Image (cartoon, rainbow, N blue to C red):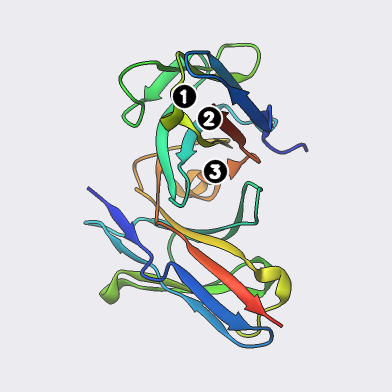
Amino acid sequence: AQSVTQPDIHITVSEGASLELRCNYSYGATPYLFWYVQSPGQGLQLLLKYFSGDTLVQGIKGFEAEFKRSQSSFNLRKPSVHWSDAAEYFCAVLKAAGNKLTFGGGTRVLVKP
Amino acid sequence: NAGVMQNPRHLVRRRGQEARLRCSPMKGHSHVYWYRQLPEEGLKFMVYLQKENIIDESGMPKERFSAEFPKEGPSILRIQQVVRGDSAAYFCASSPISGTGVFAKAKNIQYFGAGTRLSVL
């Protein structure tokens, strides 16, 4: 069975500093990969996705993620965080032939002034 | 184009009552997915439906939970005889198409609603 691991439950970062959120997946083939963001009391918003091709993908709000097949990772990065980036971030995997998303446990990001 | 609409946003039920959660997919979407988010946890898949068909219910609890997506109207997630452990946020997502193929890949994206937060007293 596939699984998604987000090793960091909480991350605190200063405004203006860089941010990297880790995501590792376990799956026999390359799945489709997603990052979603959830603001408090809200639904999930898609930040970016990887299906194939260029392993560095750009998303909304200045986020990017890099797919590394050798490490089964899909880490999310942002060069300079804003206070509005405080939220919970979820990495998710979709089997190429399936339809259900498998989510990681999430990483809660706190932004210090 | 309105997004995925879920209602109610908040639902309070006493133990033993029924909870009905509604989800209207985005216009043009015919695939609906339900996920549950327990406190301090990630989202877990429950069920995947197309119009009038349940495609995958592998994540649904065996008892008290059911889902439907009729030809007309929203998808409904129904929880009978709720218990405190059912308290969670329930999210619906929709997608326009699923399956393989170059163009299908680009559309195999699930768009989420704002969720229904169920509290069982």
Label 3 SS:
loop
Q: What residue type is labelled 1?
A: Leu
Q: Dot 3: within a 10 Å radius of its alpha carbon, few (fewer than 14), some, or many (20 or more) residues?
A: many
Q: In this view, does B114 lie to the left or right of B38?
A: right
- Marks 3 and 1 in Cβ contact (< 8 Å): no
Q: Position of residue B71 (x, y in %)?
A: 59, 11
Q: Earlier in the sequence, mark 1 or mark 2?
A: 2
Q: Where is residue A38 in the image (x, y as percent from the top left)?
A: 60, 55
Residue B120 seen in the figure: yes
Name the residue located 47 percent from the left edge and 49 percent from the top edge.
Answer: B102
Q: Which amino acid does label 3 sit on?
A: Gln
Viewer-proximal residue, A96 or B3?
B3
Q: Which amino acid does label 2 sit on?
A: Val
Q: How many discs mark residues in the rendered view?
A: 3
Residue A77 seen in the figure: no
Image quadrant assignment for residue A15: bottom right
Query: In 3D space, how far apart are the residues under numbered discs 3 and 2 (Cα atoms)?
Result: 9 Å
Query: In 3D space, how far apart are the residues under numbered discs 3 and 1 (Cα atoms)?
Result: 13 Å
- Residue under label 2: B32
- Residue under label 3: B110
- Marks 1 and 2 in Cβ contact (< 8 Å): yes
Please tell me the numbered disc located at residue B49.
1
